[in-house]
Image (spheres, rainbow, N blue to C red):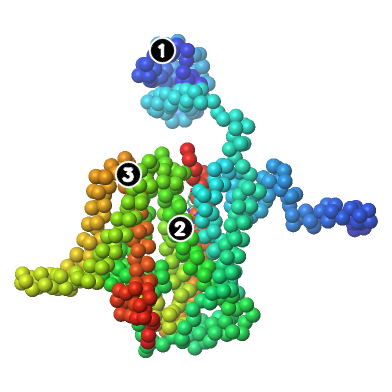
């Protein structure tokens, strides 16, 4: 034991702090790659880090141009991350029952530290995500990036757009104020106009014939678990496909 | 490889060479049915004496393709293809290692930095907005008090606007489903020419066509909204029905089927689709689009314009009773 510690202690006593900190097993286990300032480490960090490995090690220079993507796909994903974190924090304070939901929202705005900011952040990010995802679709269209071999990923994108709308809309009910219930009434009445299965669709969405507790719990579960899970899966497919299609598109 | 281009092929036409390849393939036994005597894959003997002085490599060549025979035609085609590839490769020298690494950059730090900066910029702006602007939380839900107007969230107000002009199944279900699950996913299978990939508005006429379409669509949609507000499909058809004695024109349920109604479905559908064909015709007249891609720019831009115009109309120009009015009209205020 002492033997193992000796180099460390020697470094410390000689004032060689940087070496003492980095040349040991603990540091090397947690920071597996040296600082990525050499080509080797720049490659290794992409391989060895689960978050970075979504990316390739190197990409075409043109792909960096901000005016090409405006970072919109990446920002869609980042908004999803903000929404996940702020959403989990909101879940600590919110109970999905018609008797308490509204009061929980009020408390969040008046009693909870930073609660108001938290709620605002979650809400604006949700609106922002709808806008950014839509703009991302426009960028992909107007740069012709849906063409072979990217047809499939364009289709996955269409599903992501639908899921984004649906996620946002299921969250809209949760504050249980007049805005929420009547917006959902309007929305579910529209779905109730589906030919042949309108009544059933509406019943499915409301958990009954009228908006109430059943509706709230359904939309809550969809909003905080089911849809985030589904959209994560489709995002994983989307990102994987970008790599498999040869990175993002670029001029031939 | 025995089926590679040989020096004696210089100066032959491709057809002659293809014939030669076929002969050689046959000579090498490529394309023969597998040996039925049950012996293991022994190198087949040349079936016939080679008419051309083929390079003397038959046994290795055959060993390349053990097992079931490759049809001679396929082998010959593959050889012709190899020859083409070799020709292209000879013409365009492969980019040197240096050139290639100049075109490629490391994701760390180049891309990672951009991603991080854009993410932080967005996060800070969102935090800033969240501090200054309060999200709405109005009174407790009350199912007995209907607010007027009752509106969906803004991204569905385009559909709610449509709903004012046609059958709810058409506006709320059929149109959005067809667009989101039909038309949008279909785009890449219709427009497959990759010449303009990777460039914003990549065809010479793309910008002009898109701008024209955006302006055209905006005008048509505003005109149609105003028409429905000031004259109205229903009142118009009603007067026609009265004048001509054709009550079915205004029957909301002809033959018991709501989706056959003139006022709720057929006429609104026509008013949606006819301007698209008019647009395509106008484009053909004015801009003479070159490719499918040019038309695709128009169709998609039309969709975007419709989405924007209808969303704005539904959000800012609809007040109490979902009547059309200016955004500053006092009747925009929600009452219960
Ligand atoms: C939750 C929603 C979405 C997320 C998080 C997302 C994320 C991304 C990211 C990070 C990229 C890499 C390039 C870039 O940033 O532009 C990308 C590319 C792409 N996205 Fe999305 N996307 C979403 C929705 C969509 C939608 C709605 C569509 C189209 C209908 C779409 C179609 C595509 C296609 C075809 C590419 C490849 C583009 C290229 O190669 O240049 N995505 N997406």
Which mark, residue B11?
1
Does the CB distance between marks 2 and 3 fall below 8 Å? no
Where residue B19 appears, as percent x and y from the top left, is 36, 18
Disc 1: CA contacts within 10 A as few (<14), some (14-19) or many (>=20): few
Circle 2/circle 1 CB separation < 8 Å: no
Judging depth in this view, the residue of B311 and A122 nearest the camera is B311
Tag nearer the camera, 1 or 3: 3
Residue A164 in the image: x percent, y percent?
A: 46, 65
* Residue for point 44% across, 85% down: B141
Inter-mark Cα distance, 2 to 1: 56 Å
Q: Alpha carbon of mark 2 to alpha carbon of mark 3: how far? A: 23 Å
Question: In this image, B139 relative to B19: left or right?
Answer: right
Residue annotated with mark 2: A135
Q: Which residue is drawn at 34% across and 45% down?
A: B294
Question: Residue B257 lies in what quarter of the image?
Answer: bottom left
Q: Which chain is disc 3 placed on?
A: B
Q: Earlier in the sequence, mark 1 or mark 3?
A: 1
The residue shown at (39%, 17%) is B17
Determine the secondary structure under disc 2: helix
Residue A162 position, x and y percent, is 42, 63
In the rendered image, the vertical position of residue A42 relative to residue A209, given as above or below: above
Q: Residue B328 carries which label?
A: none
Badge nearest the viewer, 2 or 1: 2
Instruction: Give how far apart the Cα atoms at labels 1 and 3 are.
Output: 41 Å
Left or right placement of residue B307 versus residue A53 in this view:
left
Q: A6 or B310, which lies in front?
A: B310
Callout 3: 10 Å neighbours few (<14), some, many (20+)? Answer: few
Residue identifier under label 3 = B292
Chain at numbered mark 2: A
> At x 58% / y 38%, what residue is drawn?
B103
């Amino acid at each position: 034991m002492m033997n193992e510690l000796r180099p460390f202690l020697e470094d410390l006593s000689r004032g060689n702090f940087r070496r003492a900190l980095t040349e040991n097993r603990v540091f090397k286990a947690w920071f597996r790659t040296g600082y990525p300032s050499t080509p080797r480490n720049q490659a290794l960090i992409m391989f060895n880090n689960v978050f970075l490995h979504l990316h390739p090690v190197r990409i075409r220079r043109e792909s960096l141009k901000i005016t090409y993507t405006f970072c919109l796909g990446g920002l869609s994903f980042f908004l999803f991350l903000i929404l996940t974190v702020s959403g989990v924090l909101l879940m600590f304070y919110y109970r999905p029952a018609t008797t308490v939901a509204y009061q929980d929202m009020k408390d969040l705005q008046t009693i909870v530290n930073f609660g108001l900011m938290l709620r605002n952040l979650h809400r604006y990010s949700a609106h922002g995500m709808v806008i950014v995802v839509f703009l991302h679709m426009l960028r992909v269209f107007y740069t012709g990036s849906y063409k072979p071999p990217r047809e499939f990923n364009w289709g996955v994108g269409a599903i992501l757009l639908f899921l984004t709308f649906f996620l946002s809309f299921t969250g809209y009910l949760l504050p249980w104020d007049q805005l929420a219930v009547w917006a959902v009434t309007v929305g579910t009445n529209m779905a109730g106009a589906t030919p042949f299965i309108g009544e059933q669709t509406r019943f499915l969405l409301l958990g009954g014939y009228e908006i109430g507790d059943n509706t709230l719990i359904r939309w809550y579960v969809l909003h905080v678990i089911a849809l985030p899970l589904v959209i994560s899966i489709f995002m994983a497919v989307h990102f994987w496909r970008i790599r498999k299609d040869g990175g993002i598109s670029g001029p031939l | 490889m025995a089926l590679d281009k040989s020096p004696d092929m210089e100066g032959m036409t491709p057809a002659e060479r293809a014939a030669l390849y076929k002969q050689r393939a046959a000579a090498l036994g490529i394309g023969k049915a597998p040996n039925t005597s049950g012996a293991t894959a022994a190198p087949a003997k040349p079936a016939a004496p080679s008419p051309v002085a083929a390079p003397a490599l038959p046994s290795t060549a055959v060993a390349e393709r053990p097992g079931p025979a490759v049809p001679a035609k396929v082998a010959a085609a593959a050889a012709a293809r190899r020859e083409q590839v070799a020709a292209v490769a000879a013409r365009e020298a492969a980019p040197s290692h240096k050139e290639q690494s100049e075109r490629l950059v490391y994701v760390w730090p180049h891309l990672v930095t951009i991603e991080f900066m854009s993410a932080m910029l967005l996060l800070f702006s969102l935090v800033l907005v969240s501090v200054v602007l309060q999200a709405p939380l109005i009174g407790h839900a009350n199912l007995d008090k209907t607010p007027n107007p009752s509106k969906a969230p803004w991204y569905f107000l385009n559909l709610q606007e449509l709903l004012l002009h046609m059958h709810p199944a058409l506006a709320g279900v059929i149109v959005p489903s067809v667009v989101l699950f039909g038309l949008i996913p279909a785009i890449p299978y219709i427009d497959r020419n990759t010449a303009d990939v990777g460039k914003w508005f990549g065809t010479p006429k793309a910008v002009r066509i898109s701008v024209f379409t955006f302006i055209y669509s905006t005008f048509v949609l505003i005109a149609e909204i105003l028409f429905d507000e000031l004259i109205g499909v229903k009142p118009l058809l009603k007067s026609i029905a009265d004048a001509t004695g054709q009550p079915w024109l205004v029957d909301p349920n002809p033959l018991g089927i709501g989706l056959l109604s003139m006022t709720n479905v057929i006429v609104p559908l026509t008013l949606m689709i006819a301007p698209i064909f008019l647009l395509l015709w106008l484009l053909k007249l004015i801009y003479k689009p070159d490719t499918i891609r040019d038309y695709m720019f128009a169709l998609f831009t039309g969709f975007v314009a419709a989405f924007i115009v209808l969303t704005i109309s539904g959000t800012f120009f609809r007040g109490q009773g979902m009547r059309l009015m200016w955004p500053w009209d006092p009747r925009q205020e929600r009452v219960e």
